[in-house]
């Protein structure tokens, strides 16, 4: 457990340093029209680094010998991680809306054990509602695939 906490703190510290460096590149001061682009990311990175230092110090002082995760505890994590990872990969090839439909359908049926009617309704309704909200109302383009191209979007 100690090693996992230390590794996590170090990885998050690396992310914090990366964000900090980019925020400095963008500028962290105050411009004529308000804070510059790097102002908020800079302070979030500083907060992240302080928290990572605290976690690292706490983990360094701890003398815990139990494992980070047990064999029984790993199964639910993988049940969540593997479909989510697959959804990210599917998004790259088929777009966000198709990936969302597949992910929701698979997850509702496999984990939730819902009826096929509920799975079908939700896995089709949610991407359609999301499409309307983001693409039509907010005019925010999301990753699209061949289905959306075929439909004219």
Image (cartoon, rainbow, N blue to C red):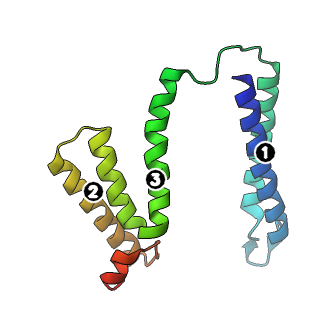
Which residue occupies the foreground of this view, 122 or 67?
67
Q: Which residue: 76% across, 58% down?
A: 19
Q: Is residue 46 above or below residue 2?
A: below
Say whether disc 1 or disc 2 marks the residue closer to the N-terminus: 1
Q: Position of residue 66 (x, y in %)?
A: 66, 15
The label on residue 123 is 2
- Which quadrant would residue 137 be assigned to in this image? bottom left
Q: Are marks 3 and 1 in contact (CB under 8 Å)?
A: no
Instruction: Identify the residue under disc 1.
Output: 13
SS label for mark 2:
helix
Q: Is residue 99 above or below residue 139?
A: above
- Horizontal side of residue 153 vs 86, given as left or right: left
Instruction: Give the position of the C terminus as an image quadrant.
Output: bottom left
* Separation (CA) of disc 1 from disc 2: 38 Å
Q: Position of residue 97 (x, y in %)?
A: 37, 66
Mark 1 surroundings: few (<14), some (14-19) or many (≥20) residues within 10 A: many
Q: Which residue: 82% across, 27% down?
A: 57
* Separation (CA) of disc 2 from disc 3: 16 Å
Q: Which residue: 36% across, 53% down?
A: 103
Say whether disc 2 or disc 3 marks the residue closer to the N-terminus: 3
Mark 2 surroundings: few (<14), some (14-19) or many (≥20) residues within 10 A: many
Say whether disc 3 or disc 1 marks the residue closer to the N-terminus: 1
SS label for mark 3:
helix
Number of numbered labels in the structure image: 3
Q: Position of residue 93 (x, y in %)?
A: 46, 69
SS label for mark 1:
helix
Q: Nearer the viewer, mark 1 or mark 2?
A: 2
Instruction: Identify the residue under disc 3.
Output: 86
């Amino acid at each position: 457990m100690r090693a996992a906490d230390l590794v996590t703190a170090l990885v998050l510290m690396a992310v914090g340093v990366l964000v900090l460096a980019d925020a400095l590149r963008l500028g962290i001061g105050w411009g004529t029209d308000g804070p510059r682009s790097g102002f908020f990311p800079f302070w979030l990175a500083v907060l992240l680094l302080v928290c990572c230092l605290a976690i690292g110090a706490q983990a360094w002082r701890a003398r815990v010998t139990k494992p980070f995760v047990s064999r029984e505890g790993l199964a639910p994590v993988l049940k969540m991680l593997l479909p989510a990872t697959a959804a990210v990969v599917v998004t790259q090839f088929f777009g966000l809306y198709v990936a969302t439909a597949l992910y929701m359908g698979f997850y509702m049926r496999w984990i939730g054990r819902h009826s096929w009617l509920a799975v079908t309704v939700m896995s089709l309704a949610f991407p359609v509602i999301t499409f309307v909200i983001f693409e039509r109302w907010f005019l925010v383009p999301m990753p699209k695939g061949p289905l959306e191209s075929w439909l004219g979007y």
